[in-house]
Amino acid sequence: METQFEKYKEIGNMIQSHGQDFIIALIILVGGLITIKYLNKLFKHILERFALKAQMIHTVNNIICVILLFLIVAAALEHLGMATIIIRRVLFLISLAVIGIIAIFRPLIPTLPFKVGNTVKVENLLGKIEATTILNTRMKTFDGKTVFIPNTKILNDFVINYHFTNTRRIKVDVGIRYDQDILKVKQILETLMVEDARVKAKPRPVVYVLNLAKGCVELGGRCWVDNVKYWTTRCDLIEKTKLRFNQEGIIMAFPQLEVHHYHGDTSPEFLGEGNHMSG
Amino acid sequence: MKVNEALKVIDEGWLRKPKGFRVHFQKQVDSEWVTEYAPGEKEKALDSDVVAWRLAWKLSEATKPDKTEIKEDELVNIYVVDDLGNPIKYYASNQFEVFNRREIES
């Protein structure tokens, strides 16, 4: 009983002597954490004014907050009486350990093949990546739907990331009737592509005769544009192609069938004697 | 002549690739005729002639003047020009086109 009483007395003396320091250290810690939270928002607003990418803002913000957290913890521990040099050594060791773990294990951690803000296609979903978490990725499609895709699905499937290259190739494929002037059509298509301000001069726009199909001669125009201008340029070129063909009298092919109807005694030359249809 | 040189000659002589398009129009300001552009001359030009002609058409429909009298907010002589200020052909007809055409005394 007396030893217990002595223990309580010892605790009471410790609280009396160091209690104030504990409370102040706690106040420093809690106050510091609240300050970091508000500073986090402030830094985010400041960094956004520099027109940096969202991922970069997030990373820089996190680094600043971690450094501030270390300083606050160091200040609290220093107030408790811990020697400054010990705090620095401990924090330095923790930093080294964290960096070492990241450096060793980072290559082993599967990463998603895109960043926030990229336009990607996963299966038949096309949209812009808004956020990524450990479990899923949030994508907004161009018709306004928000889709949450499990990261496992992304890692196990083909993903098209439209941001890896700055340019993209446009295909303008047309089919014309066999009786149309191929050279004229090639010239028109190439002119339309060359004179468009958005089409790159290199690689040069070209027009190929792709195929002599059943119902038409297939031609394909190929040109390169900036990624962001791909869709509007493609639509404009298709529109201008059709209108220019109309103006130049070029007739585009459409599915059709020629029926030869023979009357009476007349018969086609390809039917010889002995054929039951030759009469 | 090398192929690269030949291609350079072709690029310079065959077709000129415009660097941008603007919609040219005229309107009355304090009884005087003023020529303006959309986008403005200090703003970035449009990079699509299709977009520029659609803008020109919509402007002409929205500000069609009366047959006899032209009010201050009505726009006339609307057409698309390239970065050098030269009128370009309307892509739909492949002809030079002017919406809300009016003869203006200079």
Image: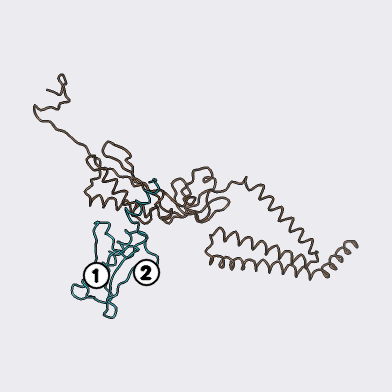
Chain colours: A brown, B cyan
Image coordinates for residue A146, horizontal then vertical, percent: 47, 55
Residue drawn 30% across the image and 41% down it: A218
Residue A262 location, quadrant: top left
Residue drawn 90% across the image and 61% down it: A3
Q: Nearer the viewer, residue A11 or A53?
A: A53
Residue tagged 1: B64
Q: Are marks 2 and 1 on the same chain?
A: yes
**Residue A48 badge:** none
Callout 1, which amino acid? Lys
**Which of the two discs, 2 and 1, labels the residue nearer the N terminus?**
2
Check disc 2 and report its element: helix, strand or loop: loop
> Tag count in the figure?
2
Image coordinates for residue B30, horizontal then vertical, percent: 28, 80
Residue tagged 2: B41
Residue farthest to the bottom, as pictured: B30
Residue farthest to the top, as pictured: A274
Residue drawn 27% across the image and 50% down it: A242
Check disc 1 and report its element: helix, strand or loop: loop
What whole-number distance in Å separates the C-alpha atoms at marks 2 and 1? 24 Å
